[in-house]
Amino acid sequence: MGISRLKHRLAFALAGISLAATAHAQLFGGDEEARRRVEALRQQVQESQRTLEERLTKIESGVNAGASRDAILDLSNQLESVRGDMAKLRGQIEVLSNQIETAGQRQKDLYLDIDTRLRKLEQAREQAAAQPPATAQAPAAADEPSAAETRAYQAALDQFKLGNYSLAVAAMQGFMVTYPQSKLAPNAQYWIGMAHSGQRNYKEAIAAQRKLLAAWPESDKAPDAMLSIASAQETMGDRKSAQRTLEELVARFPSSSSAAAAKQRLAAFSKR
C-alpha cells in the first residue's frame, strides 16, 4: 500500500472514530461517567492521530530519499506497527460504544419500568376513588391496602422518583416492617432492589430481588425482579449468568412484559 493512500485511510479512520465518540457523547450526555470516558477516548484519538501522522511523514520522507534495503525493511515494520495502532483504536471505540449502548439501554428500561408502574398505581387509585364508600355494615376487604398503607408506600416511592435511593430503601424497609402482610409488600421489596441498583450496589440489588422471588414467587413483580437481576449481572460483567436469568424468566413467565424484554436482550446477546 502506498504511503499517501495509507495516510488517507488513517485520516479517514481517525475522523470516523472521533465522530463516533462525539455522537455517543451527545446521545448520552446525561450519563456523567459515560461522558468522561468518551472525552478521554476523544483526547486519546487526537493524540494518536498526531503521533501516527508524524510517523507516516518520517516514513514517507525516508522512501522519497531513497533509503537502503535495511532502512526499507525498518520502514515496513513501522508501517505494520501503524496498522496495529489503528486496529487498536478501532477496537477501543467499538468496545466503548457497546458499553455505552448497554448502559443507555438499561437506563431506558429503568425509566420505562418506573413509568409503567406509576401509571398502574395511578389507575388503581382512580378506580378506588370512583368506588362508592363502604357502609358501616360492610368492612373493607382484608387484602386491599388501607389508606395508611397506600400513603406510606407512595411516600417511599416518591423518594425513589426523586433519586433519593438511600431514603427509598429505608422507607420501603420501614413499610414492610409496619405492614408485613400488605398486598404492596412485593412491590416494596422490588423497589428496594431497584434503589440499590440506582446506587450501583448491584450485589445488594440482586439479593433484594432474589428475596422477592423467594417470598412471593408468583407475584406480578416476580418477572420484573428477574429482569432486574439480569441487568445487574450484565452490568457486573457476568454475561453468562445474565443470559441464564433471562432464559429462566422467559420459561417461567412467558406471557409477561418482562419476558418480551428478555427475548429482545437474548436476541441482542446472540448478535454479539
Image (cartoon, rainbow, N blue to C red):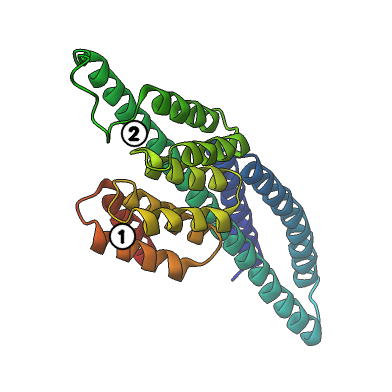
Q: Is 78 or 40 nearer to us in this picture?
A: 40
Element at label 1: helix
Relative to 167, is 34 above or below?
A: below
Would you identify the image quadrant in which residue 39 lies? top right
Looking at the image, residue 173 sits to the left or right of residue 53; the answer is: left
Q: Is residue 272 visible?
A: no
The amino acid at mark 1 is: Leu
Would you identify the image quadrant in which residue 170 lies? top right
**Measuring 77% from the left and 81% from the top, which residue is drawn there?**
74
According to the image, label 2 marks what residue? 116
According to the image, label 1 marks what residue? 249
| Residue 64 spot, x, y in % from top left | 76, 68
Dot 2 alpha-carbon crowd within 10 angstroms: few under 14, some 14 to 19, many 20 or more:
few
Q: Is 97 or 232 nearer to us in this picture?
A: 232
Q: Is 224 or 59 nearer to us in this picture?
A: 224
Q: Is 17 or 201 nearer to us in this picture?
A: 201
Element at label 2: helix
| Residue 49 spot, x, y in % from top left | 72, 55
Looking at the image, residue 42 sits to the left or right of residue 22; the answer is: right
Relative to 74, is 101 above or below?
A: above
